[in-house]
Amino acid sequence: MDPIVNTDLGSYLREMRQRVRPEQMGLRAGGARRVPGLRREEVAALAGVSQTYYTRLEQSQTAHASPQVLLAIARALDLGDDERDYLLKIGAPAPEPARLAEPVDQVSPYTRMLVGSLGNAAVAVLNYRCDILAWNSLYHRLFAPHLDLDAPGHAEDRPNIIKLNFLDAHVRALYADWATESQSNVTYLRYISADHRHDRQLAGLIGQLTMQSEEFAQLWVRQSVANCTEGSKLFDHPVVGELELMYQTADLPDGNILKFYHAEPDSPHEAALRLLNVDVEV
């Protein structure tokens, strides 16, 4: 039995079951319910498995299930794509640590050249833990000018964007909608944790945030899952004021992530970003 898989799977199923209303799945909502959402027997019936088997999964008495069963449960719980993928990962046996690829916390010369060449975008290279391995001057000026420009080069204490968002007052104040940003951070961490269950550094990051941020701890127990690859964010920057930027991510061949922020062309936000970029170069 794998206790890590058991714990993650059981708690996730319970949280997701309580989220679904009977009417969503075409069921009658009558009768007293001790908790909101579906009953275990209802999920089992919708998924086409026995109530006893489903109960064992929720109570962490069964380590994992087949992909077919997990997909059926995902449909019964009306899970989204990211939520379904997460369930498939935590419901499978955890990979042996020796078989997992070690994260590459170095940036190739070609990637550094690319980061430096994108002058009109704020660009950074992150690993999956969101440690910042490299950033261009505009990204540094946008997010953390109070830190040293060469901070990502210090492996022992390089900045982590999620830790900054929760624990650094300067960075936290940047977001016009910090509540949405914080939730996005936590749902991403929950999503990638399924692939990296043996990563002690990731576990340490989650533990530190849980201990030092009550807001993080409250969001973490909700079990919400989402991978954040593109979107837009509104900043309240102390130098250029309101700044709405679009963001995108791209996977690099070494396993790291290229993240860049840019503004809509010919918009006031692009003008503000250019002004911030000029401020960097002066």
Image (cartoon, helix red, strand yellow):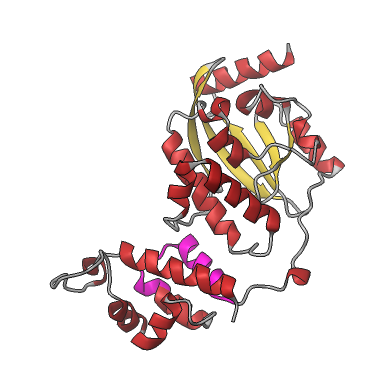
In the picture as drawn, the residue positioned furthest to the front comes out as: 211
- The quadrant the C terminus occupies is top right
Q: Is residue 184 above or below residue 194?
A: above
- Tell me which residue sits at (28%, 78%) in the image: 42
- Tell me which residue sits at (79%, 41%) in the image: 155
The residue lying toward the viewer, choosing from 62 and 233, is: 62
- Regarding residue 78, the answer to whether it shows in the image is no
- Tell me which residue sits at (45%, 42%) in the image: 215
Q: In the rendering, at what x and y percent does residue 110 appear?
A: 84, 42
Q: In this view, does 255 lie above or below 63?
A: above
Within the magenta stretch, is there residue 76? yes
**Residue 30 in which image quadrant:** bottom left
In the picture as drawn, the residue positioned furthest to the left comes out as: 30
Q: In the rendering, at what x and y percent does residue 151 appear?
A: 76, 31
Q: In the rendering, at what x and y percent does residue 122 appear?
A: 65, 30
| Image position of 70 (left or right of 41) | right
In the picture as drawn, the residue positioned furthest to the top comes out as: 282
Within the magenta stretch, is there residue 23? no
Overall secondary structure of the magenta section: helix
| Image position of 191 (left or right of 27) | right
The residue lying toward the viewer, choosing from 166 and 272, is: 166
The residue lying toward the viewer, choosing from 248 and 170, is: 170
> In this picture, which residue range is highlighted in magenta?
74-92
